[in-house]
Amino acid sequence: MGFIIAALVVGGTGLFIGVFLGIAGIKFAVEVDEKEVAVREALPGNNCGGCGFPGCDGLAAAIAKGEAPVNACPVGGEAAANEIAAIMGQEVGESVRQVAFVKCGGNCEIAKDNYEYTGVQDCEMMAFVPSGGAKKCDYGCLGFGSCVKACPFDAIHIIDGIAVVDKEACKACGKCIAKCPKQLIELVPYDQKTFVNCSSHAKGKAVTASCDIGCIGCKKCEKTCTHDAIKVTDFVAHIDYDKCTNCGECKEACPRNVIL
């Protein structure tokens, strides 16, 4: 008899809890935005933050609310943008694929060193090393690969002492840009063919003393360009990629061969 009573008590308690949880689940249920769920499924799931939102969940919510464009994911690219546009009932609009570019050509043969360094292999740690590292140029790539460690797509590698981007693997997530302590990396159009391979703001004499190809700010490229696409600011040339036609005029004019 006692066994039966205990079973009824346990069964009744379980039934009560089940009914209570069912009612609570209905009462406190969070309404799910079906578009947000569909958009999230269309995103690649890398959670890299390259879109400017906290991961793919954050971007999906923003797109569903109309707070972000359907092509905001740099990793998913055109394929994801088209799928999301169909979900949202929108046009994709024009988008230009971008890739990262490291603005330094100072490899082991070209750049000069103040001393031989042996120690921690991390660019950010060079702030605690004499002269900010062994490299004589204060603006050049340190070559210890902090950007390499940050890249989730294996798209950037240290080659001959400097970081080089594999444009086919790059997804333009921006993690390498945020990691570089020298601010040497920028996003450029995938189809761009002309680049200034230097970021030094030093004056001419200091540049030639530290690197065999560094920009000396002579403005020959600026004077030669017929498209007003290259300007020298703070002793270093900068290309306006919206104006540049990749004609190569600036490259031919550069006496330092710093323009690729």
Image (tube, rainbow, N blue to C red):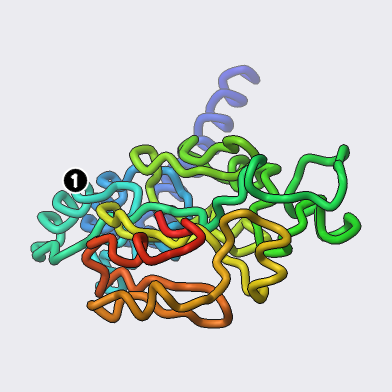
Amino acid at circle 1? Ala
Q: Element at badge 1? A: helix
Work out whether 185 lies above or below 3.
below
- Answer few, some or many: residues within 10 Å of disc 1's Cα (few below 14, many 20 plus, some between 14 and 19): few
Left or right of 240: which side holds 9?
Answer: right
Where residue 76 appears, as percent x and y from the top left, is 29, 47
Q: Residue at x 25, y 61 (%)?
A: 246
* Quadrant housing the N terminus: top right
Where residue 250 appears, as percent x and y from the top left, is 34, 66
Q: Residue at x 75, y 54 (%)?
A: 124
Q: Nearer the viewer, residue 130 or 47?
A: 130
Work out whether 96 lies above or below 158.
below
Q: Residue at x 63, y 57 (%)?
A: 180
Work out whether 50 lies above or below 229.
above
Q: Nearer the viewer, residue 91 or 98?
A: 98
Residue 174 can be seen, yes or no: yes
Count every numbered label the image shows and give the total: 1
Residue labelled with disc 1: 79
Left or right of 63: which side holds 197?
Answer: right
* Quadrant housing the C terminus: bottom left
Left or right of 94: which side holds 65?
Answer: right
Residue 58 can be seen, yes or no: no
